[in-house]
């Protein structure tokens, strides 16, 4: 009865504004020590009412925490939240904890475990090689949030933190000038939200992550928003991102993911390979080195990419890839499939089908946008024998297949281009056809020139003619003129 009356009085007083309770700090410190063995001290304390969550908050300023094992930590501001129901029952364990403006050290050891250390306020405090002196295990920290019962710890927050991230196996560390995070218990499991800025390679990148964990189904759903991320800089620091080393473009966008990790506290690479992912990314000015079999470096003015990936089903779709280049625009669509346990159609190997469209570029620049390994013989003939003029539009379709990603061969290829003012060297040393307006058709072994207009010396080419080059993959090439 007394506890209920006291709790009601506390709430009524707190709703009128912050109440100083510094005089009660010695009693609270003694109580904490008796129950936990931890020495706690604070410079001041206030009672605050949180109307949005209907909780009483005890706000402690300049908090010092020391354990019997010699671990000591200093925190600028700590909020301990209690429900009215809990106070009425005399429960002194908080239902929510928020730490404001701490300095953190996050370290990954050789086994991939993440440990978190809390630093003090001194700016000249060097970052430790390992934060073991003031650390806790992430898995152990999650345990109270998953514990049964009505009055339990249901939220942990970090507000306006600064952090240092240490990669112990590689001897590297990174500054995180701003970090906010919240981990909260829900009816179905856990929800988490964090936003932070990180400096990598002298460029500040920004991230915001929202995630939920469904304990009954083992599902994790996450949304990552990011800004000003340069993948090539991250690839230099993280070997797992080596595949992104060719992308030297600031990126912004969103990634939505759904996965079922075997261990929710430690997502592995295999878990990610089985995930469902949908992404939309925008890029600004920079350079993109396309991976093999393309292998071309593209200076870009901007680009957009949208697609999805289903690792469990062995399927990937590139819905849109739009590249704005200095002298052309390229758009690509592609689909890929590979063997997977949950694939609806069994597959013996890897297959990729794609289409590309190129608009408004000089014909002399065409070679920069036709991958050297794609229908190489046809490409070599085009690069050597089609000059001058412009490509108004070109379309290509290709299919690659093979037993694995490292052993893909070109299975099918075709394309067409609309040109204006081109010169066609159809049979050297014969004089070329000049001022050609018309269509050019490409195959893996053939090139067909269909001029609407053109000249050979003083001879005017009439519409309906055809120049067909064949045998491009053999030692002898043939030219048929109609």
Image (spheres, rainbow, N blue to C red):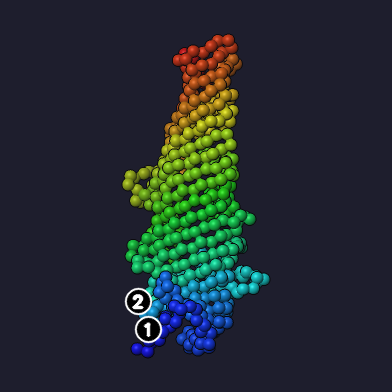
Secondary structure at numbered mark 1: helix
**Nearer-the-camera pick, 446 or 466:** 466
Q: Are marks 2 and 1 in contact (CB under 8 Å)?
A: no
Q: Is residue 436 above or below residue 160?
A: above
**Nearer-the-camera pick, 17 or 353:** 17
Image x and y of residue 151, in percent:
37, 78
**Nearer-the-camera pick, 217 or 445:** 217
Quarter of the rendering containing residue 261: bottom left
Image x and y of residue 29, in percent:
51, 86
Q: Residue at x 35, y 68 (%)?
A: 187
Assess disc 2: are there few (<14), some (14-19) or many (≥20) residues with their C-alpha within 10 Å of its C-alpha: few
Q: Which residue is mark 1?
A: 88
Secondary structure at numbered mark 2: loop
Of all residues shown, which one is farthest toward the top? 458
Q: Residue at x 37, y 83 (%)?
A: 88
Q: Residue at x 53, y 19 (%)?
A: 436
Image x and y of residue 313, in percent:
37, 49
Image x and y of residue 337, in percent:
40, 44
How far apart are the two marked residues, 2 and 1, measured between alpha carbons?
A: 14 Å
Quarter of the rendering containing residue 320: top left
Assess disc 1: are there few (<14), some (14-19) or many (≥20) residues with their C-alpha within 10 Å of its C-alpha: some
Q: Which residue is mark 2?
A: 150
Of all residues shown, which one is farthest toward the front? 16
Q: Is residue 150 above or below residue 379?
A: below
Badge 2 or badge 1: first in the primary sequence? 1
Q: Quadrant of the N terminus?
A: bottom left
């Amino acid at each position: 009865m007394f506890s209920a009356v006291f709790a009601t009085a506390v709430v009524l007083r707190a709703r009128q504004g912050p109440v100083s309770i510094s005089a009660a700090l010695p009693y609270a410190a003694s109580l904490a020590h008796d129950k936990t063995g931890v020495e706690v001290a604070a410079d001041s304390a206030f009672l605050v009412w949180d109307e949005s969550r209907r909780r009483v908050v005890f706000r402690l300023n300049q908090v010092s925490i020391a354990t019997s094992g010699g671990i000591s930590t200093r925190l600028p501001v700590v909020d301990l939240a209690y429900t009215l129901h809990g106070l009425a029952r005399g429960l002194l364990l908080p239902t929510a904890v928020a730490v404001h403006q701490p300095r953190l050290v996050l370290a990954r050891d050789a086994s991939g475990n993440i440990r978190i250390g809390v630093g003090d306020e001194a700016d000249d405090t060097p970052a430790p090689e390992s934060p073991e002196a003031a650390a806790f295990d992430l898995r152990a920290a999650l345990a109270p949030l998953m514990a049964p019962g009505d009055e339990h710890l249901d939220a942990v927050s970090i507000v306006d933190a600064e952090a240092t991230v240490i990669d112990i196996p590689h001897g590297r560390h990174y500054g995180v000038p701003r970090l906010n995070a919240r981990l909260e218990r829900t009816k179905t499991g856990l929800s988490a939200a964090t936003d932070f800025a990180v400096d990598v390679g002298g460029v500040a990148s920004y991230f915001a992550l929202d995630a939920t964990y469904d304990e009954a189904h083992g599902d994790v759903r996450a949304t990552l928003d990011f800004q000003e991320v340069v993948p090539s800089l991250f690839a230099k620091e993280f070997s797992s991102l080596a595949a992104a080393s060719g992308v030297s473009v600031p990126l912004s966008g969103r990634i939505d993911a759904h996965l079922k990790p075997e261990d929710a506290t430690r997502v592995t690479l295999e878990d990610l390979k089985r995930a469902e992912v949908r992404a939309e990314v925008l890029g600004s000015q920079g350079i993109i080195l396309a991976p093999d079999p393309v292998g071309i470096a593209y200076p870009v003015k901007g680009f957009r990419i949208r697609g999805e990936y289903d690792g469990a089903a062995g399927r990937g779709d590139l819905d849109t890839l739009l590249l704005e280049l200095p002298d052309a625009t390229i758009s690509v669509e592609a689909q890929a499939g590979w063997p997977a346990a949950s694939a609806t159609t069994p597959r013996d190997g890897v297959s990729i089908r794609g289409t590309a469209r190129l608009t408004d570029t000089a014909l002399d620049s065409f070679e920069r946008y036709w991958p050297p390994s794609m229908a190489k013989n046809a490409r070599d003939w085009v690069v050597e024998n089609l000059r001058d003029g412009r490509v108004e539009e070109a379309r290509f379709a290709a299919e690659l297949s093979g037993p694995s990603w490292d052993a893909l061969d070109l299975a099918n290829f075709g394309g067409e281009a609309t040109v204006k003012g081109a010169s066609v060297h159809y049979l050297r040393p014969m004089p070329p056809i000049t001022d050609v307006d018309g269509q050019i058709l490409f195959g893996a072994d053939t090139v067909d020139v269909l001029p609407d207009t053109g000249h050979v010396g003083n001879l005017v080419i009439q519409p309906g003619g055809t120049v067909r080059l064949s045998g491009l993959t053999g030692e002898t090439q043939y030219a048929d003129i109609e």
